[in-house]
Image (cartoon, helix red, strand yellow):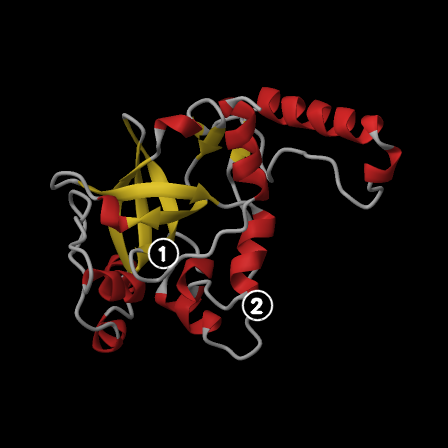
Amino acid sequence: MGRHKRTTREVLETLPLPNGTTECVARVLGATGGNLHRVQMTARDAQQIQATVIIAPAEGSATVPSSTAPSLQSSHADPEALQATLFHETLCQLPTRFRNIVFIKRGSYVIVDLSTRTGTKIGGEIIHVLYDSQIHHIKKHKLWPTELDLPITATHQDWQKAQQPNAAANPRSTASLDQASLDCISDESAEDSDDDPLLRNPNRPAYSGASDSNDGSESE
């Protein structure tokens, strides 16, 4: 199996879990060029990881707050203050092996490894791009940061609603895969099944693109 196919299978089939020590779930805010993406993680995760590694803040973003509870009260009327209180931003690099295979854009969920920090501006590396089944897997293991269920431009009212007992959120992936990669994997799976009828699984869904199309997505 070639590298391209292997990477595509890894992206689709791996069910990763962040280790909580140097890795955490983050949300992509946008691409800045050169395979770099501005991401936000929860301040809670950032504080926990900061005990192990030094996190480089993204240019123009606030440093990791020492405590979120007092600041939430003072940020009632200021969405930007709420964002700075709940989240920490940094730049993470998308490895070149994902180039022309994975397309992520604003709102995509990823797992980042902050132990791979390089220089003073790049805070870490994107090690997994998360799709719906992988998001569900992380939530099933109770490792999903509920703050990321809030909109990117969350207000204090959004935060209060999220604290209600019956509040439910179902974050969806906005990442997508190169269609040629998907076709390649689908063809290979079909050939494997045709070789041996016993290997056919009628309950296994065919590979398809992620929630959104590639239109308007930010590559690399």
Callout 1 secondary element: strand
Q: How packed is label 1: few (under 14 Cα within 10 Å), some, or many (20 or more)?
A: many
| Residue 202 in the image, given as x and y percentages of width and height | 85, 42
User: Which residue is at a point 38% across and 59% down the rendered structure image?
Assistant: 19
Q: Are marks 1 and 2 in contact (CB under 8 Å)?
A: no
Q: Position of residue 43 (x, y in %)?
A: 27, 63
Q: Residue at x 18, y 56 (%)?
A: 53
Dot 2 falls on a residue whose secondary structure is: loop
Which disc is residue 168 wearing? 2
Within 10 Å of the Cα at label 2, are there few (<14), some (14-19), or many (20+) other Cα atoms? few
Image quadrant in which you'd find residue 49: bottom left
Observer-side mark, 1 or 2, equals 1
The image quadrant where one finds the N terminus is: top right
Q: Is residue 124 above or below residue 206?
A: below
- Please identify the residue farthest to the right as the structure is shown: 197
Q: Residue 24 has which mark? A: 1
Of residue 216 and residue 33, the one placed in the foreground of this image is: 33
Q: Give the number of the disc on residue 148.
A: none
Quarter of the view holding residue 52: bottom left
